[in-house]
Amino acid sequence: MEYLVTLQKGYPDKYREKFSQADAIIIDNLQELGLFRQCLQDRFSNLLKAYFADYKQVVLFSRQPLDQIKGLANPNLISQFEWGLEVEMEEAC
């Protein structure tokens, strides 16, 4: 969510190069994406499109199933999330 917070504060160029050079990104707390305005969700969607186009890896973690994340306004995001494998993880004993 560091990327989205940076966008929200108005400093998108600060991390653009950092993220464009990475071969993979790991996004935790995806459920918080619904708290951001649609324009920020659109920018995140564009980031995912760029990664998929370059055959880079994207790993997303959420405490909620994707269909229960409230506030997702961008239908492309939901579609992009469904491109991958969804796995439910439980706490270890």
Image: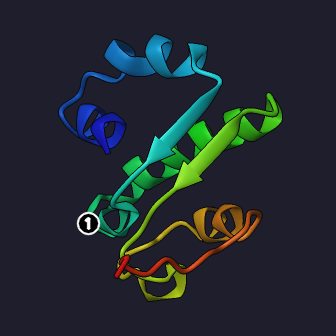
Quadrant in which residue 71 is drawn: bottom left
Q: Residue tagged by mark 1?
A: 35
Residue at image x 40%, y 62%? Answer: 30
Q: Residue 93: where, in percent of width, then height?
A: 34, 82
Q: Is residue 93 above or below residue 30?
A: below
Identify the residue at the far left of this view.
Answer: 9
Q: Nearer the viewer, residue 29 or 67?
A: 29
Quadrant in which residue 15 is drawn: top left
Q: Is residue 13 above or below residue 49?
A: above
Q: Residue 57: where, in percent of width, then height?
A: 69, 39
Residue at image x 62%, y 75%? Answer: 87
Residue at image x 65%, y 24%? Answer: 23
Q: Residue 34: where, in percent of width, then height?
A: 34, 69
Q: Is residue 49 above or below residue 41?
A: above
Which quadrant is the N terminus positioned in? top left
Q: Identify the element where label 1 is drawn.
A: helix
Question: 10 Å neighbourhood of mark 1: few (<14), some, or many (≥20)?
Answer: few
Q: Is residue 49 above or below residue 9?
A: below
Q: Is residue 65 left or right of residue 78?
A: left
Residue at image x 61%, y 71%? Answer: 78
Q: Residue 32: where, in percent of width, then height?
A: 29, 64
Identify the residue at the far front of this view.
Answer: 93
Q: Amino acid at mark 1?
A: Leu
